[in-house]
Image (spheres, rainbow, N blue to C red):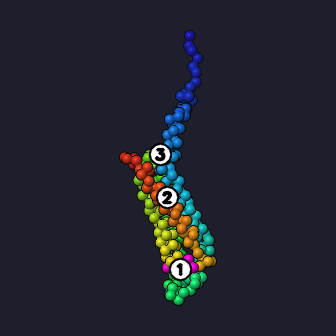
Amino acid sequence: MAQAHRPTDTDSGTHSQATTPDTQRNWLLRLGAPSAAATALTATVALYMALVAFGNITDFGTNQQFVQHVLSMDTTFKDPDLMWRAVESPALQNAAYVAVIVWETLAAVVLLAATWFWVTGLRHDAYDRARAASTVGLVMVLLLFGMGFLAIGGEWFAMWQSSDWNGLDAAARNVALAAFTLLVVHLPGVRRAGADKT
């Protein structure tokens, strides 16, 4: 006597796999790994830089005024010993502002690419490309806000003296975020011996 055929998951073309404690543990370890933190932080800085560049491109005039006032030093104490540093040429001021926007855009593109490398690397445990791209993009951010705003803007053009056009606090926050992300990207736990397979 023939037995009735009982449909199985295989018959319907599906394979049900119960979530085992080991599987849950593996996912938890992946999400809690330094590489996941590096991915999240790189993505955060990438999004921030992309929005900064987008804002400066679509609302060109707002920060153009900022750059003009900083370079002309017209809201500082106007110490005669310092005012010779002022750049009063509108053409040079605008060229500096455009250069800042181009730098921001390039940094955003590099960091977005780095984020993609991290995401794909999480699936293959391969992080060398992600780490390299993140390093380039984050150093670009550090140069822009550290050297450009804190050092050149803050000290050479005495931006610290201005109460109206002073971007030192924002620049310091950006430097701190980029530096912290760079440290996480280079944590020893992010690298696994023989991990790169891509």
Report if residue 40 is visible in the image.
yes
Residue drawn where x is 49% and y is 74% of the image: 151
The residue pinned by badge 3 equals 123
The reply to whether the magenta stretch includes residue 17 is no
Q: Position of residue 153 (x, y in %)?
A: 52, 76
Q: Looking at the rendering, in which quadrant would you find the N terminus?
A: top right
Find residue 108 and report its horizontal and vertical position in percent.
51, 63
**Label 2 residue SS:** helix
Position above or below: 125 against 65:
above
User: How many angstroms separate mark 1 from mark 3 (CA)?
Assistant: 48 Å
- Which kind of residue does numbered mark 1 sit on? Ala
Mark 3: amino acid: Arg
In percent of width and height, residue 85 lies at: 50, 84
Which residue is drawn at the image coordinates 51% and 52% (left, top)? 37
Disc 1 from disc 2: Cα separation: 29 Å
> Is 136 situated above or below 164?
above
Which x, y percent locates residue 134? Answer: 46, 59
Q: Which residues are magenta?
A: 156-161
Quarter of the view holding residue 19: top right
Distance Cα–Cα, label 3 vs label 2: 21 Å
Residue 95 in sight? no
Residue 120 vs residue 54: left or right?
Answer: left
Residue named by callout 1: 158
Which marked residue is nearer to the observer: mark 1 or mark 3? 1
